[in-house]
Amino acid sequence: MGAMRARAHVWISGRVQGVFFRAHTREVARGLGLTGFVRNLPDGRVEAVFEGEEEAVKKAIEWCHKGPPRARVERVEVRWEEPRGEFRDFEIRREL
């Protein structure tokens, strides 16, 4: 029996684009052994999906509330989903 696997779909609002938010998110996620993606949305938010061990996913979400030094996070919405195991890595995706 391994640790519980989890998947969180996250939307971050505030000053979160153009402040290296995606690069930092990828670093944090990879450091936690998570897979998924992060991308900018046209409305100024950042969207991320984290998948992996539940504790690691929770740590990634915690980090999203702070963000990198120049970000100003105003709101983090989280929707828990069934893990699908579709990602091999954690990547930065192009804006929608």
Image (cartoon, grey):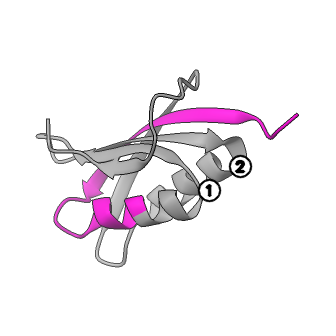
Location of residue 84 in the rendering, given as x and y in whole percent from the top left corner: 53, 23
Mark identifier at residue 11 = none
Q: Residue at x 52, y 35 (%)?
A: 8
Which residue range is magenta in the image? 1-26
In the rendered view of the protein, which quadrant contains the N terminus? top right
Location of residue 78 in the rendering, given as x and y in whole percent from the top left corner: 49, 36
Q: Residue at x 16, y 65 (%)?
A: 18
Asked which secondary structure carries label 2, the reply is helix
Location of residue 37 in the rendering, given as x and y in whole percent from the top left corner: 36, 44
Q: Residue at x 44, y 47 (%)?
A: 89
User: Distance of mark 2 from mark 1, alpha carbons?
Assistant: 6 Å
Mark identifier at residue 59 = 1
**Viewer-nearest residue: 83 or 47:** 83
Q: Residue at x 23, y 45 (%)?
A: 93
Residue 90 left/right relative to 19:
right
| Amino acid found under the numbered disc labelled 2 | Glu
- Residue 8 belongs to the span the image colors magenta: yes
Above or below, 41 against 70 in this view is above
Mark 2, Cα crowd under 10 Å, few <14 / some 14-19 / many 20+, is few
Residue 83 left/right relative to 45:
right
- Residue 49 belongs to the span the image colors magenta: no
Q: Given contact means CB atoms under 8 Å apart, are the residues at marks 2 and 1 in contact? A: yes
| Amino acid found under the numbered disc labelled 1 | Lys
Residue 23's image quarter? bottom left
Residue 80's image quarter? top right
Asked which secondary structure carries label 1, the reply is helix
Which residue is outermost to the front?
88
Residue 4 left/right relative to 96:
right
**Viewer-nearest residue: 34 or 64:** 34
In the rendered view of the protein, which quadrant contains the C terminus? top left
Mark identifier at residue 55 = 2
